Amino acid sequence: MGAKIDAIGLSTPGFFRRGSIDMEVKAAKECLKNAGVDPNLLGLLVNTGIYRDRHIGEPAIATLIQREIGANEVFAGGRSTFSFDLTNGGCGILTGMMVIDGYLQSGNIDYGMVVTADVDPTPGKTRGYDFTSAAAAVLLSRSEQGGGFLHYRTATDAGFIDDLQGRIEWMEHRGKMRNILVISQADDYAGACARFALENLDAFLKEVSLKIKDIDLIIPSQSPRGFLKELRKKKGLEDKLVDVTDKMANVHTAGIGFALERVRSNGRFAAAKNCVFLTVGAGLTASVALYRNPA
């Protein structure tokens, strides 16, 4: 029995620009409301966003979210919420769910939440930022009826480490020297991501003794641009892939949340016997997970 998905919360900037933390707080509150769970029951809160307000490094963004949603804000020696950040790019949200799954299986917590968002921290100054600002939160608990997350596969190929980089550089902007976020991406980055993801999907299916025809849904990363198009070239995948780029193009770390919400709202997720999460990110990194809805 693995961790099961209880609820999802989403957030976008709307008409007015909102920071990453504000959006994550909104998504987390919506997620808890949808699940009917008190914030104080959260045992673990993991933030997996990459591009955040003012390039904040410390304290952990997760602790700021914890305070704003009122999850055991003041430690009183009893029940507590452990909050930390985990950075793994496009694989981050699934990596966060893997970590939460481990805590749930240990019996140390009853609920865990992964929250993620990306925004352009310096609009008009940033160079190469091409992601849609968005936030997502996913609440998990221990499945007592079987199902949930059953198997994971993770891999890294450091031979592509230069294909996508986000870094702060000291550069001139409008006659002044400033710290500016610069993102560079190789021309075939999407193709490299797709090839690496598919290699690991094939290996994963062998590990769980399944074939493509046995998979009902594949919930993939929604970035980089062109990644889903490349995935569709593999025979048998097109009708299984969840694609939200028609409404939310190039959502980075929150893409899995938006894809998951779409299939939950239209009933496809509940109807699926075998659902595969397929994430990819800079590094290259890839993560694959098998999920079955509890009985």
Image (cartoon, rainbow, N blue to C red):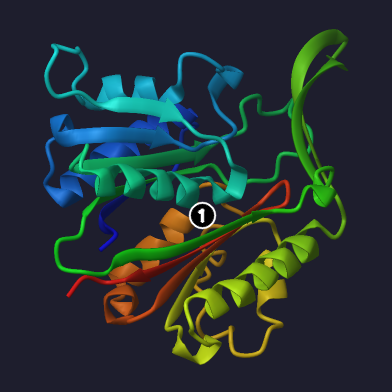
Instruction: Residue at 56%, 79% (x, y): give it.
Output: 206
Can residue 69 be spotted in the picture? yes
- Left or right: 139 in relation to 186: left
Q: Identify the residue position indicated by label 1 in the image.
A: 255
| Front-lying residue, 190 or 147 | 147
Instruction: Residue at 48%, 83% (x, y): give it.
Output: 209
Instruction: Residue at 37%, 20% (x, y): give it.
Output: 64
User: Percent x, y for residue 279?
Assistant: 57, 59
| Front-lying residue, 92 or 98 | 98
Instruction: Residue at 50%, 32% (x, y): give it.
Output: 17
Quarter of the rendering containing residue 113? top left
**How many numbered marks does the figure carry?**
1
User: Percent x, y for residue 253?
Assistant: 54, 46
Q: Is residue 182 above or below residue 225?
A: above
Quarter of the rendering containing residue 12? top left
- Left or right: 262 in relation to 106: right
